[in-house]
Image: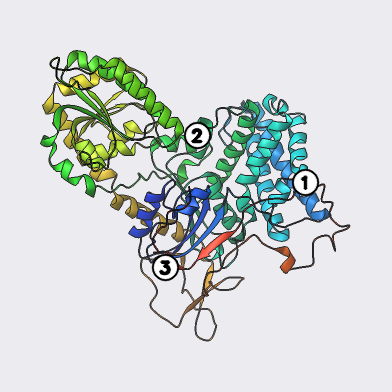
Amino acid sequence: MRIGLLTEGGYPYVSGEAGLWCDRLVRGLGQHEFDVYALTRSERQEARGWVPLPPQVSRVRTASLWDAEDDGVVYGRRARRRFAEHYGELAATLSTTVPGQVPGAAETVSRADSEAAPDQSALEADRFANALYGLAELARDEGGLPRALRSETAVRALERACRAPGAHRLAREARVPDLLTVAARLERALRPLSLDWYEDDGLGAVDLCHAASGGTAALPGLLARHFCEVPLLVTEYGVRLRAHYLTDPDSSPSIRALLAAFHGRLAAETYRRAALITPGNAHARRWQERCGADRAKLRTVHPGMDATPFAEAGESPECADPRTLVWVGRVEPAKDLVSLLHAFAEIRKEEPGARLRIVGGPADPEGAAYLAHCKGLAAQLFPDEADGPHAVGSNPVSFEETGGPELPSRADAYASGALVVLSSVVEGFPAGLVEAMFCGRATVSTDVGAVVEAIGGTGLVVPPRNPRALAEACVALLRDPERRARLGAAARARALELFTVEQNVAAFHGIYLDILSRTPARRVVLDETGEPVPFSAPAEGHVPGRWTESTARAAVRGGPGWATDAPVRATVRDPASEKAPAGTSGGPAPDASDMGPPAAVPLTAIDEPSAMASVPVTEGVR
């Protein structure tokens, strides 16, 4: 079958989210064809290039969410009226969403209220969906939306919605700078509406759209379903709505409330239209249910990880230093290394010979500042101790990074200690913890995110931000080597059973076939005379492998066949090449002042031939 893989800020680029998981999935399903539709977030990401792509990736198309270019589309009077109507409806659904209530979640109402009035939540969901698809149809008919989304018309519509009766308090308190910020964020999130991906030679030619995350990445899948009836599969290892709540804390309450309403409405619509939803863990599954996902559509698929690099460490646990604790990960405040250092101070009182190795580096300036703070705290808590007046002192806490002669890889970092510690206060799926399980190491972790689900009963779990409890659990395992060995062996067995690449690929292969078996066939197979071949393409016929007969050809019902020519650079739909300029038949010439300043929106989509997929990645300008 042909899969349209939808990504945002990740695959096929070298850096980004879910890139490694997508690459393993594509390579593991070599019997299928993949068209990758990628949204990029930064110039640096684009400059660093792609990872080498396997031959089953037949096409890659990209569109930018960060650049600013003028799409050159100017609407006439009727088009402006349609835009104002749909955008105003969308803004109204955001301003009436109660802050703190997740759109799409079940509401508790009395029996009398439920009988007297229709479900208000369902009505608002339909209102949001109609506005969203109305904007998409406008972009399809008239051209791109970026200039309109940045116009004064959009800001005025948003202001009217926030000042209208029924708007919640935070929406009414939004000031002009807040409205401008929200309008700019919405324009960026809605850029996929303006792309020319939703034709019979684009996403309309795939059998299934697979969104590698929710949010903006799933928006092209929603439009492919709306325009071409292509089924949608959504995979989330971290729910985007949850990520929105945890980021951008410096914005005003009005901005956060309106944007949270948009992300919540989009998540609810995505879950409602998806054929199946595959959360990566129970923690993400609970968030999806809270956002309105139907439990019948949910199938938990744990992320697949490569166990091969950790095999040697897992098969020789006796090589570990029995007095060393190891922490491995990305240094940032959410990892709460401060609590870990205070806990280690308590551990040293009970076990004076204990040592702590903190392995990892920061990913941004905030992480670098946090690392410097932790180093200073470690120097205060554990002064360098020397055996004599002429000896060099040493610190029981070391800050290291992989790649050097002492710790060439993460597997070597885990193998260096008998106990692996995780002290996070925020965590999605703990990939580092699973790596430690592959290495056969006992673990002590804080009870956050999907930690309990990952380790099961193979490790100790303590409350977050509790150094004393963390210290007591570590001391208990340091003093009991038999228990450490027993927990480590059980952890390795559990990880090999649940979290390998093979089980992840097999699960998605079955899910693809399941969705296609329940989806009406959208193509007709024609014989050499051009007549349909009866019963030639039932939905159940999408089995592993490619067709070998050369006499049959596929045609999209109601449109041209699959594109067989070389991929071309795709851009925003240009109405000037299809009809007379806007304004010649829809009334007077458009008023440029009404549509605001010229737009600067990057909606170029690069459609590279598959021959370019395996070229070496070049280092771009930082």
Q: Earlier in the sequence, mark 2 or mark 3?
A: 2
Q: In this picture, is 140 found above or below 384?
A: below
Q: Mark 2 highlights which residue?
A: 242
Taking depth in this image into account, of 188 and 283 the one nearest to the observer is 188
| Residue denoted by label 1 | 596
Residue extending furthest toward the right: 588
Instruction: Determine the secondary structure under disc 1.
Output: loop
Residue mark closest to the camera, 3 vs 1:
1
Q: Which amino acid type corresponds to the residue marked 3 in the rendered image?
A: Gly
Question: Callout 1, which amino acid?
Answer: Gly
Can residue 599 be seen from the camera position used here?
yes
Query: Is residue 427 toward the left or the right of residue 359 in the image?
Result: right
Q: Are marks 2 and 1 in contact (CB under 8 Å)?
A: no
- Whichever of labels 2 and 1 marks the residue nearer the N terminus, that label is 2
Q: Quadrant of residue 447?
A: top left
Measuring 17% from the left and 22% from the top, which residue is drawn there? Answer: 392
For image coordinates 18% across by 34% down, the residue present is 416
Q: Left or right: where does residue 37 sit relative to residue 618?
A: right
Mark sitting on residue 541:
3
